[in-house]
Image (tube, helix red, strand yellow):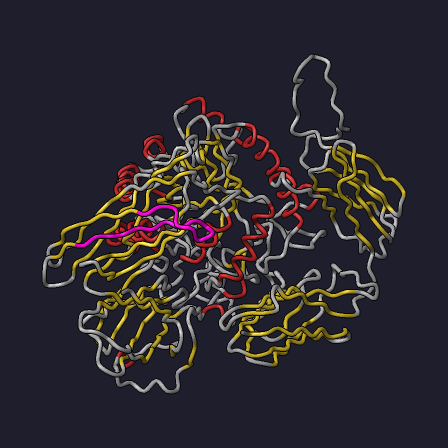
Amino acid sequence: MRITENFNNGWKFVLDDAKEYVCKEYNDSDWRLLNLPHDWSIENELKEDAMTGGGGGFAMAGTGWYRKHFVIEDLKDDEEVSLLFDGVYMCATVYLNGERIASHAYGYTPFTAELTGKLLEGENVLAVRVDNSKQPNSRWYSGSGIYRNVTLIRTGKVHFDLWGLQYDTNGIYPTQDIASIQLRATLVNDSDLPIYTGVVHKLYDAEGKLITKAGAGIYLEAGEKGQCETRPDIKAPHLWTDKTPYLYTLVSTVMVDGEPVDEMTTRVGLRTATFDCDKGFLLNGESVKIKGMCLHHDCGLAGAVGYGEIWERRLKKLKDMGCNGIRCAHNPPSQEFLDLCDELGFLVMDEICDEWMLGKNKNHNYFSENFSYGYSQFFKNNIEEDLVKMIHRDFNHPSVILWSIGNEIPEQASRDGVAIAKFLQDICHREDHSRMVTTACDNIASVPAWSATEGFLDTVDVVGYNYTGRWRNRAETFYEEDRILHPTWRMLGSENPSVGGIRGNYVDEGMFFDRYEISTLDNEALWRFTATHDYVAGDYLWTGIDYLGETRWPSRGAASGPLDTAGFEKDSYYYFRSIWNNDDITLHLIPHWNWQGQEGTFKHVICYTNCDEVKLYINDRLVGTKGLGWPRSGAQNNWFEGRNTYRTTNDLHLSFDVPYEQGELKAVGYKNGEIVAEKVLKTTGEAVKLAAVPDTKQVAPGGLVQFEISAADKADLRVPTATPLVSIKIDGPAHLVGMDGGNLKDLTVYSESSRKMFAGALLAVVMADAPGKVTVTFEAEGLEACIVDFDIV
């Protein structure tokens, strides 16, 4: 039977390059001992002259080596053994006992290293060279190293192929109380004899109850690979949706002579997903507007290492905001990331790459002539293999609704681009006939020399618009001109502006951001259009979370999301929540009310809400009453029906001008004439103590505890302007992963034990090492310390 083992622990690492590191006998006793996944770039100091440049976040790159000494216990003669690397950035070469056994260029697609017949009795030595020295090679922070999981896979001679079990949901009809799914197993016979084998499938519901059982057989010659298919029925199916992401469990067992020889477990989400030129995106036959965000792969303080706990905290916040879609920009994500999307109900655009044959500027100063490095180096020889790997690995994720074959590809304006787009889309259709294909185009209707050709846009299943309002009068008309000229195009906002800015900054947002009181206006215009035009499938906005890279010195990243790198909510988070989350009440006021010394100065007070009306009070005196006027609705039954709510604006926010005075600013929200919410801002005193809230008090070894840290005054009010230097001390079997306040201009290495709080908030992430009790102390000069305990079990 299949044995799948985590192969992450007990590696040695050196940031250096020498030929002798490949040798089994090399003495690596002075190398650093660590566990994977690992990103060496995030551990080192940022430098203005770093070769990664602003695109790569001024991070250190270079070449590093990993070595692992290991013994395979109870190895049988008929076993097949391999390693699965989910992601190594980049140009990885794998050696076993001095022999080269695998190489892989692209940093974002998985690859295997075959160990069968090469393992020694006793100790073996695996060496992995990672070459990220050719810089700049990325327009965003890539990280460096074996930054995703490594898995050891042991099977018998007759086994499932890698990603050899697929399910197809085209037999689901939402209007019926029965569904059928096609189960397709790819089996391999690595034995020396022909064999008759088969697969038994058992489908269990979320409570563990057996729902249906099916089987199929196949005859395989020695060394042959083949597929067997079956289509079981499911009565009263629970459909997977963005609001109710129901998951079944499929257990598939390979049988030979009545005995099980291999087994795979697959989570199953029953759903159909397609795009229509008139109705937009259809999930299970119903029109669903995609309210999506683009995300880069970095995990903030953890760099390229995508810890599940960090992503879960981030994604749950986006979900509560009303976001239901994620575009993986601009590369395939980790397996664990897609698992979370399946569980939480996100609609994912899975994207293969940022370049085809033509490279792009990586320096982010727009004056460099260096286009030398990047995926364009490997595209011609590697793209089909990389694209197929992405599709095969991610095929069974119900969250994946669309394949993207590229982002802002320069070839969109060339004759060659049409042929390449068709070639890539044909691969997608060959490997998966259930999903449509898009490419994200930034030059639709731009100047003629750059503009995407109609032939290029006609080629793809779904036309992806990046910045649909960028060019001329399209800032007002958006998609409408193309709708008239091309009524059969399926249209999607693959990348449009989000609302970014610096959390807590109400004075100078900088050259890239509007002031807080007008920051949402462009997005409001886009959303009003998108929400009221069915043919537009929805939007993926740039971005959902601030990210590392694509910046200028002295900064480590781009502040374009409603969440910062620490996962703290900016004010724009509540703007999106007010227009996207219709299930919960949102009532949010900005700015904070700590403007001591500016008494009498008018402050622009902005309210993000989905209440009908809001009354604003300063120290219990009514400032005014305002109401949202969008969406407007016409009469339902007669000409003279009146509107019951008070309407003062068609903007998607409310605004008040309030002379500042210390005290309490309070908003009271009404729906249908009833009070449904209150929001209070108070002028605080000076910070006197720290507070820290962990996301859990019990964790397993290898797990994370995330602390949200704030500073409070004597009345226990959180001080929104506090910026103390906070130090962390850990007693017990745990260590600091990093701290982050979301300030992209704080260039302190994340893993340092002291960091300045930013705008009243700081995140600390601690990893559990072994069972025991851990005491974490947070200290800052002049403030009362905070002590928190947690258990590792």
Residue 27 located left or right of residue 316: left
Residue at (44% x, 71% y) in the render:
40
Q: Nearer the viewer, residue 425 or 232?
A: 232
Q: Is residue 43 above or below residue 410?
A: below
Front residue (pair 249, 696)? 249
Residue 270 in view (yes/no): yes
The quadrant the N terminus occupies is: bottom left
What is the quadrant of the C terminus in the image?
bottom right
The residue closer to the viewer here, 184 or 405, is: 184
Q: Main secondary structure of the magenta part?
A: strand
Q: Quadrant of residue 66?
A: bottom left
The location of residue 375, given as percent across then percent down, is: 33, 54
Q: Is residue 289 left or right of residue 203?
A: right
Q: Quadrant of residue 464?
A: top left
Q: Residue 112, percent across and down?
A: 28, 63
The reply to whether the magenta stretch includes residue 772 is: no
Instruction: Please give the count of numbered marks on the rendered protein.
Output: 0
Q: Residue at x 42, y 80 (%)?
A: 33
Instruction: Please say if 394 is above or below 59.
Output: above
Is residue 447 something that shows in the picture? no
Q: Is 361 left, or right, of 672 in this rendering? A: left
Q: Position of residue 288 (x, y in %)?
A: 50, 35
- Is 190 placed left or right of 430 in the picture? left
Q: Determine which quarter of the picture holds residue 719.
A: bottom right
Q: Which residues are magenta?
A: 197-213
Residue at x-position 59% and y-position 38%: 523
Give the image location of residue 381, x and y in percent.
Answer: 24, 53
Q: Residue furthest top?
A: 639
